[in-house]
C-alpha cells in the first residue's frame, strides 16, 4: 500500500515538474522571438525601392545576372549612387553553380529598378562592365516606356 502512495507521489511530482519546465520553455521562446517588423524583413537595398514603388513609381526588370559577385557589386554600386533596387533568385546559383554562370538562363538573378532611375543605373552598369573588362553574364533590358 505504501509503495502505491510513493509511486503516486513521484508521478505527481514528475507531472508538476514537466508542466513547469514546459511553461518556462514556452516563455523563454516567446521572449527570444523579436516582434515582427517589416523593415527587418527587407534588406537595405530593397527598402527604398519598395517605399518608392508603394508611392506610385513604376518598376522594371533592369538586369539579368548569372553571377552572384556581379550582382552584389552592382547592387552596392547602385545603392551608393542612390538608386534603389530589388533582386530575385539571388541564392539559386548556389544550387546550380557553374550551370548558371555558363549561359544566361531562367535561373539567373533578376535585378529590378524604378524606371525613373534607368538612365543613371545604365551609366553605373556601363562603368562597371568597362572596369571589369567584360559584360559576360550581364544582360541589360531596354527602358520601358
Image (cartoon, rainbow, N blue to C red):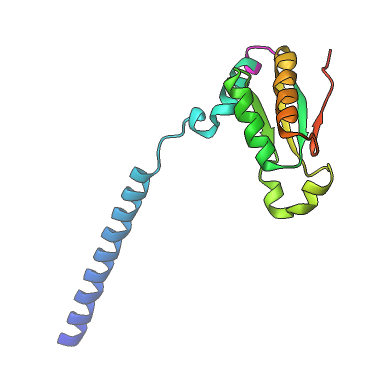
Task: State which quarter of the image contains the N terminus.
Answer: bottom left
Task: Determine the image quadrant of residue 12.
Answer: bottom left
Q: Which residue is drawn at 26% across and 70% down?
A: 14
Residue 21, given in percent of the width and then of the height, sits at: 28, 60
Residue 81 visible here? yes
Residue 131, given in percent of the width and then of the height, sits at: 71, 30
Residue 61, given in percent of the width and then of the height, sits at: 77, 26
Task: Determine the image quadrant of residue 114.
Answer: top right
Q: Which residue is drawn at 70% across and 47% down?
A: 92
**Residue 38 vs residue 97, the one in the foreground:** 97
Residue 96, relative to residue 118: is it above or below?
A: below
Residue 1 visible here? no
Task: Determine the image quadrant of residue 64.
Answer: top right
Look at the image and say whether residue 57 sits in the magenta stretch: yes
Query: What segment carries the magenta color?
Result: 53-58
Side of 41 relative to 20 (left or right)? right
Q: Is the magenta stretch mostly helix, strand or loop?
A: loop
**Residue 82 vs residue 115, the one in the foreground:** 82
Residue 68, given in percent of the width and then of the height, sits at: 67, 42
**Residue 64 vs residue 7, the one in the foreground:** 64
Side of 13 relative to 131 (left or right)? left
Total tally of numbered discs in the picture: 0
Residue 87, relative to residue 107: is it above or below?
A: above
Task: State which quarter of the image contains the C terminus.
Answer: top right
Look at the image and say whether residue 78 sits in the magenta stretch: no
**Residue 86 vs residue 19, the one in the foreground:** 86
Q: Residue furthest toward the left?
A: 2
Amino acid at each position: 500500500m505504501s509503495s502505491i502512495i510513493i509511486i503516486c507521489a513521484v508521478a505527481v511530482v514528475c507531472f508538476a515538474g514537466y508542466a513547469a519546465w514546459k511553461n518556462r520553455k514556452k516563455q523563454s521562446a516567446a521572449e527570444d522571438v523579436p516582434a515582427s517588423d517589416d523593415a527587418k524583413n527587407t534588406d537595405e537595398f530593397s527598402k527604398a525601392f519598395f517605399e518608392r514603388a508603394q508611392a506610385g513609381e513604376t518598376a522594371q526588370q533592369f538586369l539579368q545576372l548569372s553571377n552572384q559577385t556581379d550582382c552584389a557589386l552592382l547592387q552596392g554600386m547602385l545603392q551608393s549612387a542612390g538608386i534603389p533596387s530589388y533582386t530575385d533568385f539571388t541564392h539559386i546559383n548556389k544550387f546550380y553553380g557553374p550551370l548558371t554562370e555558363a549561359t544566361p538562363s531562367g535561373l539567373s538573378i533578376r535585378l529590378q529598378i524604378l524606371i525613373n532611375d534607368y538612365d543613371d543605373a545604365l551609366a553605373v552598369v556601363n562603368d562597371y562592365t568597362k572596369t571589369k573588362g567584360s559584360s559576360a553574364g550581364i544582360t541589360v533590358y531596354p527602358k520601358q516606356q
